[in-house]
Image (cartoon, coloured by chain):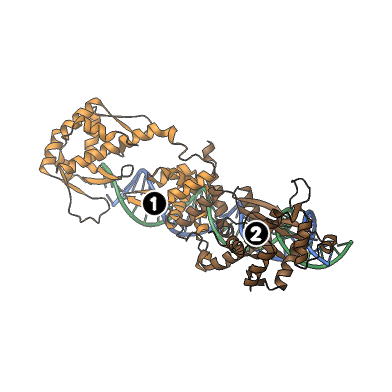
Chain colours: A brown, B orange, C green, D blue
Amino acid sequence: MSSNEPHVAKIAALIGDPARANILKALMDGRARTAKELAQIAGVSPQTTSGHLAKLSDGGLLSLAKQGRHRYYHLANAQVAAAIESLMALAGERILPKHHHHTRVAGALRAARTCYDHIAGKLGVCLFDQLVARGCILPASEDGGGEAEDFVVTTAGRQLFSALQIDVDTLANGKRRFARACLDWSERSPHLAGSLGAALAERCFELGWLERRRDSRAVTLTRAGQAGLAQHFDLTPDQIAAAMAEVH
Amino acid sequence: MSSNEPHVAKIAALIGDPARANILKALMDGRARTAKELAQIAGVSPQTTSGHLAKLSDGGLLSLAKQGRHRYYHLANAQVAAAIESLMALAGERILPKHHHHTRVAGALRAARTCYDHIAGKLGVCLFDQLVARGCILPASEDGGGEAEDFVVTTAGRQLFSALQIDVDTLANGKRRFARACLDWSERSPHLAGSLGAALAERCFELGWLERRRDSRAVTLTRAGQAGLAQHFDLTPDQIAAAMAEVH
DNA sequence: GCAACAGTTCGGTGGGCACCGAAGTCTCCG
DNA sequence: CGGAGACTTCGGTGCCCACCGAACTGTTGC
């Protein structure tokens, strides 16, 4: 009588709580979010959210990716998304109902945003990739297992950053961790973090290459910024624009 | 903020109770069942089941067809079945897990069975259709709205039944309701009920045309029955056999 | 080291709901 | 009409669980 154990009921009960349902709906776009963001979306306290997230993970609906003091939750697999989608269809809800309302903000967030004090989003990933491709930074030989990898700056990189009036040596001798890869969960690729990443972002704001927006971590790449970054990172302005374009 | 109302959560919570999940799973084959049957399947008392069924109906997951003192519940539409199927897939449950185990009984039940005291299943529907097609019975002019339609027997029908030694006049004057259409929920078509339907079934058993089985409402159509019904209902034995064959 | 912050665990409270017994409604049948 | 049976409604009990405040762990940055 193994079919008598109410397995479906357990899964459905997990989705059947309003707070948890909101969490799952918010994750339907395939991106990952921190527990705090999800708490705000769910409309309950962080403690309660933590419990919900633990239940959803135990139930196999969510997966967890630890990163520093953040914990990124995302849907475990496509089956989960399919099940929720069919429930939303039954409930007469629009699939991804908030998308039109927030598309511009979400798109902008995905294109370029700050991650604490450094640059994330497609722009951040693009710049990081270029730094690696041109041999400006190299992974420190920590042998793969580490969670957030550390990097060193090569001679080529030193030239690039000094051209931007960023003093690599001072930063490298500072107490703060110097250069590390920060996994970007909207792009599933790393971008540059640490004091070097923060200095780069700060310089971009000083030069008017990036501008902050209100009430959002999204940033705008100005025309001057597009030209300046293209020049210093050995890219064409078109390449930067293409990297930031929404494929979706 | 209409998207903030947790509609999905309500639907999922409906499926999230073990008793209700068992009910829904049992109805996944598309057939309808009475509240009592579902109570047994769910493993709870009839009162509790009644509450569950009311909730599921209010939530749009089940539809109700009243018929006499029975109330047949079935899945409201294919969307509901799709949603439950995706949840079962998530839970790692076999779709329609009991099907192989019960296929033979279910097939026999569907081919020919008793419904209280008259003939139901594919055979019952076949005979009823033929009675209507040959003009043996006609709907009493009740103008469509009635739940279970009443019928009158024509002269042609009188001949047919008297050839079977069934006295139509005596039955028509009896206190019991004479001839009515009983909706057959495995076939979604009506079959003949009332005192006339009961008399026909009784005569079939007397003549050895039908034989009861143990522990089931299924009945077996004998070779003699196939020939006899074919003759009296103006059908060929092949037509009867084809009507009773499982398409599924 | 210390402050700040993300996130979790623990304890206690409260509300919602599944459950059953008993009683009521409706239909069928003789 | 009266009895039987299917099903529902009502009332009361008990349990589960969502919720938050407070305290704890672990990471980041100065």
Q: Closer to the camera: disc 1 or disc 2?
A: 2
* Residue at 37% over, 45% down: B32
* Residue at 51% over, 50% down: A83
User: Which quadrant holds residue A234?
Assistant: bottom right
Residue at the far top in the pictured view: B223
Count up the numbered dots. 2
Secondary structure category for the residue under label 1: loop
Determine whether, in the image, residue A99 is placed left or right of residue A213: left
Whole-angstrom CA distance, mark 1 to mark 2, is 48 Å
Rendered location of residue A40, percent (x, y): 63, 65
The residue beneath circle 2 is: A126
Q: Is residue B171 above or below residue A207?
A: above
Rendered location of residue B29, percent (x, y): 40, 42
* Residue at 67% over, 68% down: A228
The residue beneath circle 1 is: B77
Q: Chain of mark 1?
A: B
**Whether labels 1 and 2 share one chain:** no
> Is residue B217 visible in the rendered structure shown here?
no
Determine crowd level at label 1: few under 14, some 14-19, many 20+ residues with C-alpha closer than 10 A. some
Residue flagged by tag 2: what amino acid is it? Cys
